[in-house]
Amino acid sequence: MTKRPHTLLYMMAAATTAAIISSCQLNTTYSRYQSTHIEGWEKNDTLFYEVPPVDAAGRFIQTLGIRIGDAFPFTSISLVVEQRIFPGRRSKVDTLRCNFTDDQGRLKGPGINLHQYEFPIGTIDLRPGDSLSIKVRHTMKREIMPGISDVGIQIERMP
């Protein structure tokens, strides 16, 4: 009889974990990473993200994710995020300065060989049927940025 309460406890823990994981995914509208060239991300190498039409109107939080390795030579990077909303053709341009180190110059992001960072882009209001075309490029003076592995966009519906 002692096995039954443990089994019930495990089943409840599994159900709770599944509920938490699935509820976190409900707000995510779009999430995609793209890899950059292994030699480095070239200045004229724009990354494109095509967000499919949303089902319902709402305000959405946008986040840029970036993964860097030890070969990245700087403490930060400047990025331009250009967005075009269809069908209305509204556009929005944001410049992000992504700082990777703390005050002592140590990398802030979690990871061993690659460090993961997330930076807020902002919020955007979308209507039913609106889709987004997003472009991301770096604006650093150096033509090729080594050490950047992936760049991603995540869009979540605000509660």
Image (spheres, rainbow, N blue to C red):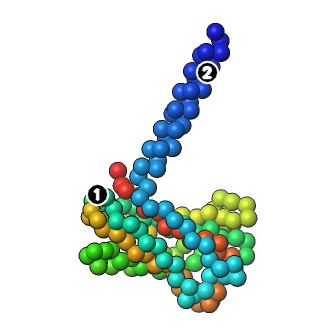
Of callouts 2 and 1, the N-terminal one: 2
Q: Secondary structure at mark 2?
A: helix
Q: Residue at x 62, y 68 (%)?
A: 67
Instruction: Classify residue 101 by image quadrant.
Output: bottom right
Measuring from the top left, give residue 113's x and y in whole percent: 73, 64
Q: Residue at x 57, y 78 (%)?
A: 77
At label 1, counting other C-alpha atoms closer than 10 Å, the crowd grade (few under 14, some 14-19, many 20 or more) is: few
Residue 75 appears anywhere in the view: no
Residue 77 lies, with reference to residue 152, above or below; the image says below
In the rendered structure, the answer to whether residue 81 lies left or right of residue 100 reads left
Q: Residue at x 42, y 79 (%)?
A: 82
Identity, as a three-letter code, of the amino acid under mark 2 = Thr
Residue 34 lies, with reference to residue 154, above or below; the image says below
Measuring from the top left, give residue 157's x and y in whole percent: 37, 56
Residue to which mark 2 is pinned = 7
Measuring from the top left, give residue 146's x and y in whole percent: 68, 80
Q: Secondary structure at mark 1?
A: loop
Residue 76 lies, with reference to residue 29, above or below; the image says below
Measuring from the top left, give residue 73's x and y in whole percent: 69, 79
Q: Nearer the viewer, residue 88 or 61?
A: 88
Residue to which mark 1 is pinned = 56
Q: Nearer the viewer, residue 96 or 23?
A: 23
In the rendered structure, the answer to whether residue 93 lies left or right of residue 150 reads left
Q: Which quarter of the rendering shows the N terminus?
A: top right
In the rendered structure, the answer to whether residue 44 lies left or right of residue 55 reads right
Q: CA distance from mark 2 to mark 1?
A: 41 Å
Residue 21 lies, with reference to residue 138, above or below; the image says above
Residue 69 appears anywhere in the view: yes
Q: Nearer the viewer, residue 104 or 18?
A: 18
| Number of marks in the rendered image | 2
Identity, as a three-letter code, of the amino acid under mark 1 = Ala
